[in-house]
């Protein structure tokens, strides 16, 4: 049985001690996504979408939350306040390439207030495991060349990472490591430097 089934939920503690809930994204997360997008800085939005984007259209929101969790997989991180209200703070996804079924395009977005706490690293590690479960062997990511954190995360994920392109936008092709269970352990060590 796969780990990342519809009922999958986990809790993680970030570097600063904050706790986040991790789970699969579902259609009812539309409002969480809209609120998180409204909180993101222009720089974070431009980094994620490779262009200035003042808002998400209804069609884009639907595309981002109504996923099949096989060819388009999305995992989310939320924080829960004392009265039980959720706020989305991070999301990661991959979309399988139709002409290369073992290759997928990944993306990770973390709200500005949660950047630098290891959440992006954690999300990408979990996404990699979910991808391997679904037959993905390679990630192909297109991103801004100036986005050094993503470049470091991809290189940390796998030494078999190749970069192509010149100018402001580049593409990385990452061979996903095996076995998948080792990914999460390696990422946790990278996050905290104290996990055995």
Image (tube, rainbow, N blue to C red):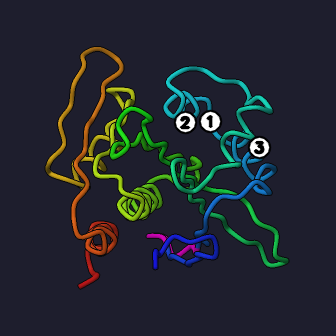
> Can you identify the residue that label 3 sits on?
34
User: Is 17 part of what is drawn in magenta?
Assistant: yes
User: What residue would you read off at disc 1?
Assistant: 41
Mark 1 residue element: loop
- For disc 2, the marked residue is 44
User: How many discs appear?
Assistant: 3
Name the image quarter holding residue 128: bottom left
Label 2 secondary element:
helix
Residue 83 in the image: x percent, y percent? Answer: 85, 77
Q: Magenta part of the protein: which range?
A: 14-19
The residue under the point 19% across, 43% down is 161
Q: Which mark is residue 153?
A: none
Foreground residue among 70 and 62: 70
Task: Assess whether mark 2 and mark 1 are in contact (beta carbons under 8 angstroms).
Answer: yes
Task: Tell me where residue 158 appears, x and y as whole percent.
Answer: 20, 53
Identify the secondary structure beneath mark 3.
helix
Q: Nearer the viewer, mark 3 or mark 1?
A: 3
Density class for disc 3 (Cα within 10 Å; few <14, some 14-19, many ≥20) is some
Question: From the viewer's perspective, is residue 81 above or below residue 59?
Answer: below
The structure residue drawn at horizontal position 65% and vertical position 58%, both measured from the top left corner, is 25
Q: Horizontal and vertical percent for residue 96?
A: 45, 42
- Residue at far top of view: 167
- Our reading of the magenta stretch's main secondary structure is loop
Q: Earlier in the sequence, mark 3 or mark 1?
A: 3
Residue appearing at x 56%, y 78% in the figure = 11
138 or 190: which is nearer to us? 138
Badge 3 vs badge 1, beta-carbon distance below 8 Å: no
Mark 3–mark 2 distance (CA, rounded to whole Å): 15 Å
Residue 85 as seen in the image, left or right of residue 80: right
Figure check: 66 above or below 147: below
Distance from disc 3 to disc 1, alpha carbons, whole Å, reads 13 Å
Q: Specify whether residue 26 is painted magenta.
A: no
């Amino acid at each position: 049985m796969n780990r990342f089934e519809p009922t999958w939920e986990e809790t993680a503690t970030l570097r600063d001690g904050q706790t986040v809930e991790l789970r699969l994204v579902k259609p009812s997360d539309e409002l969480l996504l809209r609120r998180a997008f409204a909180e993101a800085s222009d720089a974070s939005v431009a980094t994620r979408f490779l262009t200035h984007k003042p808002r998400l259209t209804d069609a884009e929101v639907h595309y981002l939350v109504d996923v099949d969790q096989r060819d388009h997989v999305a995992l989310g991180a939320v924080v829960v306040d004392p009265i039980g209200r959720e706020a989305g703070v991070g999301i990661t996804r991959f979309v399988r390439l139709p002409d290369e079924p073992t290759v997928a395009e990944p993306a990770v977005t973390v709200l500005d207030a949660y950047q630098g706490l290891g959440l992006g690293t954690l999300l990408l590690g979990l996404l990699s495991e979910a991808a391997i479960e679904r037959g993905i062997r390679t990630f192909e990511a297109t991103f801004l060349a100036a986005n050094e954190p993503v470049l470091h995360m991809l290189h940390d994920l796998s030494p078999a990472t190749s970069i192509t392109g010149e100018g402001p936008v580049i593409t990385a092709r990452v061979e996903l490591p095996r076995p998948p269970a080792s990914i999460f352990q390696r990422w946790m060590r990278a996050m905290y430097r104290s996990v055995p």
